[in-house]
Amino acid sequence: MPDILMSIRNLRTYFYTYAGVVKALDGVDLEIYKGETLGLVGETGCGKSVTALSIMQLVPNPPGRIVSGQILLEGEDLLKKSEEEMRKIRGAKISMVFQDPMTYINPVLTIGDQISEVILLHQDLRKEVLAMKIEDLRRKLEKVEPTSGSARDFNSKIEELEKKMNDPPKPSKSDVKKAALKKTIETLKLVRMPYPERVVKQYPHELSGGMRQRAMIAMALSCGPSLLIADEATTALDVTVQAQILQLLNELKREIGASILIITHDLGIVAEMCDRVGVMYAGVIVEYTGTKALFRKPLHPYTQGLLRSIPKLHKEMERLEIIPGSVPNLIYPPPGCRFHPRCLYIMEMCKKERPPMFEPEEGHYVACYLYGQRGN
Amino acid sequence: MAQLKSPLKMKSGLSKWREDLEPQVRELRFTIYLLRQSPLVVAGFILMFAFVSMAIFAPWITPYGPEERIWEAKLQPPSSQHFFGTDESGGDIFSRIIWASQLDLAIAVIVVATAMAIGSVMGAVSGFLGGKIDEVMMRITDIFLAFPALILAMTIAAALGRNLTNLTIALIIVWWPAYARLIRGQVLSEREKLYVEAARAVGAPTRRIIFRHVLPNSIYPLLINATLDLGGVILTAAGLSFIGFGAGAGIAEWGRMIADGRNYLFQSPWMATFPGLAILLSALAMNLVGDGLRDVLDPRLRR
Amino acid sequence: MREAFPMKMKDYIIRRLLLLIPVLIGISMVTFTLSHMIGDPVAAYLPGGAVERIREQQIQQIIKAHHLDEPIYMQYWYYVNDIMHGDWGVSRSDHDRPVVVSIQNYFPATFELTSVAIVVSLLMGIPIGIVSATKKDKPVDHATRLFSLTGISIPIFWFALLLQYLFFYQFKINKLPYLPLEGRVDDFVMIFHPLRTVTGFYILDSIITGNWPVLISSVSHIVLPGFALAYATLALITRMMRSSMLEVLRQDYITLAKSKGLSERVVIYKHALKNAMIPTVTVTGLAFGGLLAGAVLTETVFAWPGIGRWATGAILTDDIGAIMGFTLLIAVVYVLANLIVDLIYAALDPRIKLG
């Protein structure tokens, strides 16, 4: 049984608008394992992004509010934490990469500044500063005669500093900034940014779309988070750039060992990137399983409809398949199973009560009465 | 081939016109609903309505005529007979303020309406025709906009002669360039929009495109600016009269009354106070309404 | 980071200054045209306006000397020529001093007043605007909005009178320390403690030369007119700051900043503020025109010896030389102010291409 990093139980997030209460998330259950890539897939408006914002507790407060539920990160309920505690977690333990790098990066600050600020905020750079100083001295040492007086000088200084490694002294502001800059460039190299030393001084409008997205990823990864949430991170990019970014994310996952929550509407991305996948519809999770299992044997009628509607290049098709009906109004959602007005296999029970999650096969969860009765 | 009977029979005249306007009517109703939400905006409308009524019904609501002087009762503080007191020649300030509203509001409306009309036409022509004409128009407006309003109006009023008519003309000359710029900007951005291309593709003539498509879409910013400018003109006209450029001595005009009141500021402060309040409240009304309209007509805030 | 004055910036400044020339030409044409519509051109050159007792010969002399018999475009040429050589005519209303001298005398006073007004407006307006935006719809916000709405609706000259009535008259008769009624400084103080002129600005000069009595007097004299002038601009800046702050706080990059765990403070002052300042700076430049206009009214009420008051007197007495000089000056100042605003704008927003 793999280790669970995050456990979301019965999450409800509502938006109180003048037209009514929009039940954007109405009982979401999810688990993210350590080191895995979990996909959250669904149409626009089904609540995927709201889920991400709820985890970060960045739901805009009027009009939105997390009404109930639990979000357990390594055993602790995030929803019970104070704002100050959450701020320590944001950017450090959990970080997010957003959809449009043009609008999500501050246009008047340099890239380097926007990455360094995360490092400076969450990391105690004393050791790094000390290491930098030692490094400096070593370089000076190389340039002098090994037997000279200055060499002895340097050596003794290095020894002195190395002794302080376990409890380094408080560094000056400029030293800290230098250390942060060094780390920033390292992070940019990590995301395969070309010419990182130049990029740190540049502004977002001077970079291409793909580079900007790498910069955003760098911001998110700079402090080695346990969970990276990618909310439609490639939607605004060209297809070729999209492929590069996805490949980057895959490599990074291996290199830094974080879990990734990929939020997308694109099943192709899911197939490419995710270990497991959750399908969302109208604010609830309707199916939830490993990626291969989902594609090979989709159980929920909605998932089946989704997969059917993808045009297939290898077969001849006369018309495109659609799912009849339209997405429900989240202020007055249909009673019972939210999908029932559009479902081909509708039964009486579906109209009355929302189906719980059944597990007809191991590790494959579906919220549909086709696979069980209440009380099973 | 036989004439096919179109299933959509072309409606004629009035009913078609009404149908065309239906979406706009719905928008209008929504706008009114939103406006009602903010108490400040409602207050602005009420104030505006109050001032307009005051100006229209002046002859019926003033206890004294505009030129009435009661020499024995000069420089009296506010009382039940003279609500706002009397001035140095015995004129009832309360009545004079109401009479003055006719003048000041009329000036404001005339200036803004005329400036808007002239400016819109110039701006639309300039924007649509482009090229050299547009360049020249831009330089001309640049020059006018290089002067602060009051100062330019002052100079023009002086050149033409110091009376109210010339003041109005001066203000119109000062105010039209801003509208020309505004409409030109609107025309330029609307021109790029696809529906104009579509209209051209169907063969609509330029004039029709301007009047039926571009102008209606420019109404909102125009309306907002016009409302805010009403307040601006009232303030500028009063300021100019105060220094001596508009209303001559004795005429019931708010700025003029304050200038007269200045001479008796310490012993009879009511002379200057109340006309100033009138200016403040009328300008405030315009600003409240203009602000409200701007907030409400902002497309991003309308859901 | 960018250098303080990169090459591109210098080029940009030069280019903008060059572009000013057609505008200046246009302005000079306007002033020239206007002045010819005001009164009798010959009368303008008569000392003290002695229109009556004049002989035909003198009229002819004047006409010849000032090219009044030549065609209009020649007159315009002479006009421009004179201006370039520093001859801006003579101000009849100012004891027949040359216009440039009048300007030299009166401009520092107006500049000092408007500077104080701008500084006050910015120092107060920006923070209040920020607070108003961050505490939207709370009582602080409503109070601020009412305060600024009043500021843009109030007639400056009336407000000035109100201040005089309150802080001079009422305080005085109630035996409270009161502020001066008018003028720039107490004449008696100036006589007993003569001020050495360094910059022409009384407040600066009195600080530099350690002349405390003049300092106190000039500061106390500038309080009321400065505030009267500042109120409208302060209101404008507060409103602009509030609305652009609200706009900025809605942006996506603010959400990203929050997702990094940055504190409210850092998000507002580092990420939001710089972006919000951009439209505010633009508005300040435009407001400068309003300040000049307001200076005219304020100087009249407070008998402030600045160019506004001089100009008003000039226009009321058909002093053509002064009118032309004043109008030209104001236009130039206004245009320069807008240039400065553009430069600040370019410095704030890295997206502006100076090329």
Image: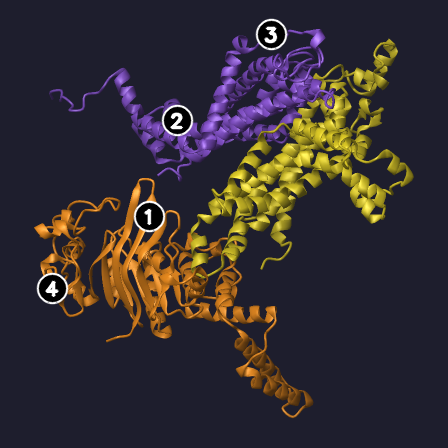
Chain colours: A orange, B purple, C yellow
Q: What's the mark number on residue B216?
A: 2
Q: Amino acid at mark 2?
A: Pro
Q: Nearer the viewer, mark 2 or mark 1?
A: 1
Chain of the residue displaying label 3: B
Q: Is residue C325 visible?
A: no
- Which image quadrant is residue A35 in? bottom left
Name the residue beneath numbered marker 1.
Answer: A15
Residues under numbered marks 2 and 1 in contact, where contact means CB atoms less than 8 Å apart: no
Q: Amino acid at mark 3?
A: Gly
Residues under numbered marks 2 and 3 in contact, where contact means CB atoms less than 8 Å apart: no
Q: What's the mark number on residue A25?
A: none
Name the residue beneath numbered marker 3.
Answer: B65
Name the residue beneath numbered marker 4.
Answer: A376
Q: Position of residue A32 (x, y in %)?
A: 29, 67
Q: For the residue carrying disc 4, how many other residues have a C-alpha within 10 Å: few (<14), some (14-19), or many (20+)? A: few
On the picture, is C184 further left or further right than A191?
Answer: right
Q: Earlier in the sequence, mark 2 or mark 3?
A: 3
Label 3, secondary structure: give it. loop
Q: Amino acid at mark 1?
A: Phe
